[in-house]
């Protein structure tokens, strides 16, 4: 990796006038210029906006004014998150030329904290996928192993940070799309509790599951970004009023005595041997750190994938109805209104998005609603109950993030079910609304990254970060 800048290093260097924010932005754009044609991590660069913000930060330094917490930090934004004046495609042809008239709250908060938004990152179309191969703008390569996928759907955000083309990035997670690409690219990646970060300006896939969260090269930077974007937003009624703790301070607490639950359902068959060995070594390390390990049961785990693909597709079919050729993006003209709808949506959406719209419309249709959607909601409640029960006995849960290491490009594209199974360990926490992080847990054969997933109770982000930080500091990343 190129010289790994951290948030503290950026701020420190700016304050000491060793580098200016504009020079730093230029340096990152140079690296992007060198590496992006191979990786395809960025879809759009927002140079004008970045340099304007960098100049603002340089003016603060020149005037001797205090620097905000993310001053000059180059950050990339997943292309499903709205950026005012900067094209936002959702990885779809249907929004190829869409330029949002406003910023997502998370983006606005990052800029208010001094961050420099470098550009928009590639992703699976409307965040539907686990490999980034569903993007209308081509696949992304995993910087750690360029014949492999970076994971998805936030593949571009993960690859950009792992390749040193941004200090941090925002992704979104509906069923695993932050944690799994974090795991595949060997960097920490976190989703806060549902409601922890405002969804305002996040272009919806499945509204009851979608969450925005950070990728960075280390857990302290993950904590810093989460702290900036978290908190109540009057534009999102599902965002919580719960106060935002100082995550960076909280994560320094010792983990000795922390009770770590190991759900045995997550270690059943189907897991790659190399992944299993690394995760077992990771759990050993937690023991050495003084954590108390406890095996527990989460009885409804097996139903999570099926439940997720009913609820997520149902919500997607409704959310994506707005792309009708009238209000947003692409319009393919025809004689009648119906023909215009059909041609627009036929040409604008890719195969996976169409598959999900059809599935979601089916599970919501009269006659099937009770058998699928309503049943799915009931099972979702049972899965959430599993988590609540578990957190009465343990402080955190530890599992693998993904059952397999990064796979080869093209290896799973013809088998949607295989692709859906990539999320088997992540969708549970999505359905339950709890926070989760993936932290690096070594590499198979020194090459393919493995991620350890830590779940905490709702709004227990500080505990999740505390354990992730201790694990990282103890060398979990090089197991
Ligand atoms: N891979 C899962 C899906 O395809 C999750 C995607 C996500 O979290 N956005 O739906």
Image (spheres, grey):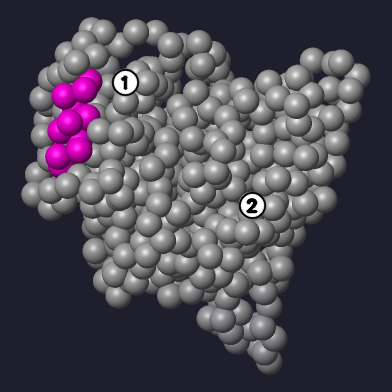
Residue occupying the far right of the picture: 63
Question: Residue 343's image quarter?
Answer: bottom right
Instruction: Decide if residue 402 is on the left or right side of residue 27.
Output: left
User: Which comes before the other along the chain, label 2 or label 1?
Assistant: 2
The answer, for residue 304, to whether it is visible in the render is no
Q: Tell me if residue 73 comes above or below residue 204 in the rendering.
A: above
Q: Which residue is mark 2?
A: 31
Residue located beneath label 1 in the image: 474
Per the model, the C-alpha gap separating discs 2 and 1 is 31 Å
For disc 1, the neighbor class at 10 Å (few under 14, some 14 to 19, many from 20) is: some
- The reply to whether residue 189 is visible in this rendering is yes
Specify start and end residues of the magenta stretch as a single range.
276-286
In the rendered image, residue 279 lying in the magenta stretch gets the answer: yes
> Are discs 2 and 1 less than 8 Å apart at CB?
no
Tell me if residue 220 is in the magenta stretch: no
Q: Position of residue 435 (x, y in %)?
A: 39, 30
Q: Position of residue 166 (x, y in %)?
A: 60, 43
- Image quadrant for the C terminus? top left
Secondary structure state at the residue bearing disc 2:
helix
Q: Residue at x 54, y 13 (%)?
A: 246
Left or right: residue 295 compared with residue 379: left
SS under mark 1: loop
Q: How many marks?
A: 2
x and y, in percent, of residue 59 in the image: 88, 28
The answer to whether the residue bearing label 2 lies less than 8 angstroms from the nearest atom of ligand 1 is no
Few, some or many C-alpha atoms within 10 Å of disc 2 (few <14, some 14-19, many ≥20)?
Answer: some
Question: In the picture provided, is 155 more to the left or to the right than 336?
Answer: left
């Amino acid at each position: 990796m190129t010289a790994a800048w951290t948030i503290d290093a950026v701020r420190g260097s700016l304050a000491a006038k060793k580098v200016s924010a504009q020079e730093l932005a230029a340096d990152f754009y140079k690296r992007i210029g060198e590496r992006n044609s191979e990786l395809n991590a960025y879809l759009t660069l927002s140079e004008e906006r970045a340099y304007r913000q960098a100049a603002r930060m340089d003016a603060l330094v020149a005037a001797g004014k205090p620097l905000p917490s993310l001053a000059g930090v180059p950050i990339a934004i997943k292309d499903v998150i709205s950026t005012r004046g900067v094209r936002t495609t959702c990885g779809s042809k249907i929004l190829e030329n869409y330029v949002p008239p406003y910023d997502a709250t998370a983006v606005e908060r990052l800029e208010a904290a001094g961050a420099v938004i470098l550009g928009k990152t590639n992703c699976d179309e409307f965040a539907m996928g686990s490999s980034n191969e569903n993007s209308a703008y081509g696949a992304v390569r995993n910087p750690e192993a360029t014949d492999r996928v970076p994971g998805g759907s936030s593949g571009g955000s993960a690859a950009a940070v792992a390749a040193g083309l941004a200090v941090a990035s925002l992704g979104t997670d509906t069923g695993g799309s932050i944690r799994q690409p974090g795991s595949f690219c060997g960097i920490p990646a976190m989703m806060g509790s549902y409601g922890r970060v405002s969804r305002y300006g996040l272009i919806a896939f499945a509204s009851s599951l979608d969450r925005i969260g950070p990728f960075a090269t280390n857990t302290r930077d993950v904590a810093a970004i989460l702290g900036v974007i978290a908190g109540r937003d009057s534009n999102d009624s599902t965002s919580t009023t719960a106060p935002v703790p100082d995550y960076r301070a909280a994560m320094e607490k010792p983990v000795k005595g922390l009770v770590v639950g190991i759900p045995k359902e997550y270690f059943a068959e189907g897991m790659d041997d190399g992944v299993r060995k690394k995760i077992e070594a990771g759990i050993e390390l937690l023991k050495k750190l003084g954590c108390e390990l406890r095996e527990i049961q989460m009885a409804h785990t097996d139903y999570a994938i099926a439940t997720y693909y009913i609820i997520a597709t149902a919500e997607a079919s409704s959310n994506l109805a707005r792309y009708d050729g009238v209000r947003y993006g692409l319009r393919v003209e025809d004689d009648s209104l119906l023909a215009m709808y059909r041609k627009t949506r036929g040409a604008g959406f890719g195969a996976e998005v169409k598959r999900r719209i059809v599935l979601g419309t089916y599970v919501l249709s009269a006659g099937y609603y009770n058998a699928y959607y309503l049943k799915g909601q009931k099972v979702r409640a049972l899965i959430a109950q599993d988590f609540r029960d578990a957190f009465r006995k343990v402080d955190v849960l530890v599992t693998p993030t993904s059952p397999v290491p990064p796979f080869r490009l093209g290896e799973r594209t013809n088998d949607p079910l295989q692709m859906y199974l990539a999320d088997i360990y992540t969708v549970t926490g999505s359905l339950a609304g709890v926070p989760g992080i993936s932290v690096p847990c070594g590499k198979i054969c020194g090459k393919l990254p493995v991620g350890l997933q830590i779940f905490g109770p709702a709004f227990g982000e500080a505990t999740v970060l505390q354990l992730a930080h201790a694990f990282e500091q103890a060398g979990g990343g090089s197991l």
